[in-house]
Every structure is written in structure tokens, then in C-alpha cells.
Amino acid sequence: MTGMHRFANPTRFLRIANAVLPWFAGLTVICFVAGLYLGLITAPPDYQQGETVRIMFVHVPAAWMALFVYSVMALASAVGFIWKHPLNDLVAKTSAPIGAAFTFLALVTGALWGQPMWGTWWVWDARLTSVLVLFFLYLGYMALWQAYDNPVKAAKPAAILALVGFVNVPIIKFSVDWWNTLHQPASVVTMEGPKMGNEFLIPLLVMAAAFKFYYLTVLIYRLRTEISARKIRALTLAQVEG
């Protein structure tokens, strides 16, 4: 707990973040270049999906990140709500637009894959519908922050929404197991191990790493901007009151 309190200090956090930011940015570029090369050039067409399989190298990591980012938001919101750490509220706030973008990308690429494979752009099955609900949760969370002029007052209701909405994350994860859906079940993380060959698995994991490093890079950029804006706002209020 002491370590968590130590890293919750904005000044200390920024010092660490500025040190790791170039590494995250560099790894993002390297992983994206390698992943796109492996996925678009070296990976063979799938025997069932043909060239359409290449959409999965973007769709699957985007879907993973949609769930991961919301989980980060919920965890950060819980810490901020319980221990009153403003930095955790900022982590949740600045993560939301990134997570919404990942979710939108997952929905769009899923539709692009579904049309040739299922013969339709959209079906109201459990997986697709719950991911759409996740997208609306992101939008609602961001709208809630914007509804308050005072960010301190906005943090608490936003945290409650993030925590309540987290119930949708396991629903998305296990929807293909709980209900009969068109969406295919898990093929990477299973009890029997991955159900795909290395020619597809490796590009998929490299792209997943690229998305993860991209999230961390953009998160740090957004956090720096948000912390600076908070400092400017505090100084302005102090001058007005003085």
C-alpha cells in the first residue's frame, strides 16, 4: 500500500513516466511494423477465411484492449474512490477515449469480417451486443466527466459508473460460452492451448503488444496534459481568490 501511495504522487509519477515514454513509443513503432509485416505479408491465407483472416490481426487485439482498458479504468476508479488519489481518477479519465477508440475499431473490423464470413455486417448476438454496450459505457463515462465544471466533483459519479459498468466485462468475455452465438469461441487462451498455428498466432501476439504499448504511450501523453491543466487551473483559482 505504501508503494501505491508513493506512485500516486503526480510529480513522482511524471518523473517515471517521462523516463519510460520514449521506450514505450519506440516499442509501439517496432511492434506495429513487425506485426503488420508478419500479418499482411508473411502470414498465409487461411484455408477457410482466405485473405479475410488478416482482419483478425487488428480486430482481436482491438477487442482485447477494449476490455483491458475498461478494466484499468475500473481498477483506477476503485482506488481513487476508496483512497482519494486524484492521479487514479486521471488515469481512468484519460484512458476512456483510448478505450472507446479500441472498442469502435473492434466493432468496425468485426463488421468488415462478418460480412464476407457470415453474410451480414451485424447480428444482435450476445458478444456483439455486449461490446456495443461497452462502447456506450465509454461514451457515457466521458460525457459524465464533461457534465461537471469541477473535475473534483465529477470524479465520484464517474468512478461509480466505471465500477457498475465493469459487470459487462465478464459478460463479454464469457458470452460465447454462456449463450449460443454466431461469434466464434476463444482460440488463443484456452484450456488446451492456442487453437491456431504459429503463422497466425505470432503476428496476432505482436500486434497485441503493439496495441498495448500504444495505449501506454498515449496514456502518458494524455496524463501529462491533464496534470498540467490541473496545475494551471489550481494556480488560476488561487490568483482569483487571492
Image (tube, rainbow, N blue to C red):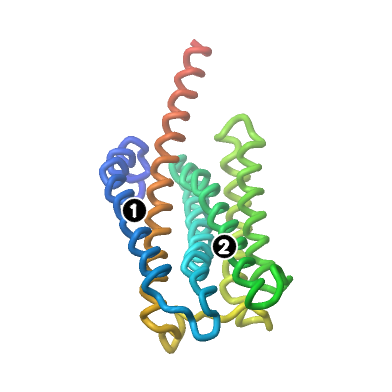
For the residue labelled by badge 1, is the local secondary structure a helix, a strand or a loop? helix
**Which percent across, then down, holds residue 117?**
63, 77
Point 40% across, 64% down: residue: 207
Using the image, determine if residue 138 lies above or below residue 222.
below
Q: Mark 1, residues whose alpha carbon is within 10 Å: few (<14), some, or many (≥20)?
A: some
Residue sitting farthest toward the right: 124
Q: Identify residue type, mark 1.
A: Val
**Residue 45, position as x, y percentages in the image:** 47, 79
C-alpha span from label 2 to label 1: 20 Å
Residue 2 in view in this figure: no
Vertical placement of 56 versus 148: above or below?
A: below
Residue 172, given in percent of the width and then of the height, sits at 60, 70
x and y, in percent, of residue 109 in the image: 58, 64
What is the total number of numbered labels drawn onto the structure image? 2
Image point (66%, 61%), residue name: 132
Mark 2 is surrounded, within 10 Å at the Cα level, by few (under 14), some (14 to 19) or many (20 or more) other residues, namely: many
The residue depicted at 49 percent of the width and 64 percent of the height is 58
Per the rendering, the mark at residue 128 is none
What residue did someone put label 2 on?
106
> Is residue 153 toward the left or the right of residue 235 in the image?
right
Q: Is residue 88 left or right of residue 184?
A: left
Q: Is residue 139 visible?
A: yes
User: Which residue is depicted at the point 59% across and 43% down?
Assistant: 156
Q: Quadrant of residue 178?
A: bottom right
* Residue underneath mark 1: 29
Vertically, is 221 above or below 230? Answer: below
The outermost residue toward the bottom is 192
Q: Which mark's residue is nearer the viewer, 2 or 1? A: 1
Q: Return the disc, 2 or 1, that comes first in the chain's sequence.
A: 1
